[in-house]
Amino acid sequence: MSVEITNEYGHVTISKEVISTVAGGAATECYGIVGMASKNQFRDGLSEILGKENFSRGVVVTNDEGDLTIDMYIIVSYGTKVSEVAHNVQNQVKYALKRMIGLNVNAVNIYIHGVRVTA
């Protein structure tokens, strides 16, 4: 599935993979984020941190009649305040999607799948 935008200039179709890549890139730039986790940890491995090419496996995009909801599965750094990191990720993802693609996001749900000690 994809998100479709129609305006006076024409019609644009944006795939969910593009949305998940933009959201994952914005999230990994936030302080306290070690990386993205897979939403299917038992199938993909318990400790796998996804690379840039696999953000779509750690981000779920749902579009219900124009209401865009994003579920993100992340791994945070040890010693950071988890609630602040999650709040920063929510704000950064909403801002990035609005600025880059022009999409208004209804909700960004954060699922913490692990804590890592970074060296």
Image (cartoon, helix red, strand yellow):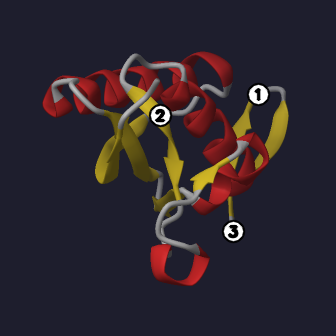
- The residue where tag 3 is placed is 1
In the displayed structure, 55 sits above or below 38; it is above
Q: Residue at x 57, y 59 (%)?
A: 48
**Distance Cα–Cα, label 2 vs label 1:** 41 Å
Residue 19: horizontal and vertical position, in percent? 64, 44
Asked where in the image residue 23 lies, by quadrant, the reply is: top right
The residue drawn where x is 47% and y is 34% is 34
User: Does residue 70 appear anywhere in the picture?
Assistant: no
Res. 56 mark: none
Q: Nearer the viewer, residue 115 or 103?
A: 115
Element assignment for label 3: loop
Residues at marks 2 and 3, CA–CA distance in whole angstroms = 29 Å
- Nearest-to-viewer mark from 2 and 1: 2
Q: For mark 2, what is the residue?
A: 34
Type of the residue with mark 1: Glu
Instruction: Choose the circle earlier in sequence order: 3 or 1.
Output: 3
Q: Position of residue 14 (x, y in %)?
A: 75, 47
Q: Which residue is mark 1?
A: 8
- State the image coordinates of residue 105 (x, y, percent, origin top left): 42, 38
Against 25, residue 24 (above or below) is below
User: Given this view, does label 3 or label 1 mark the residue nearer the observer?
Assistant: 3
The amino acid type of the residue labelled 3 equals Met
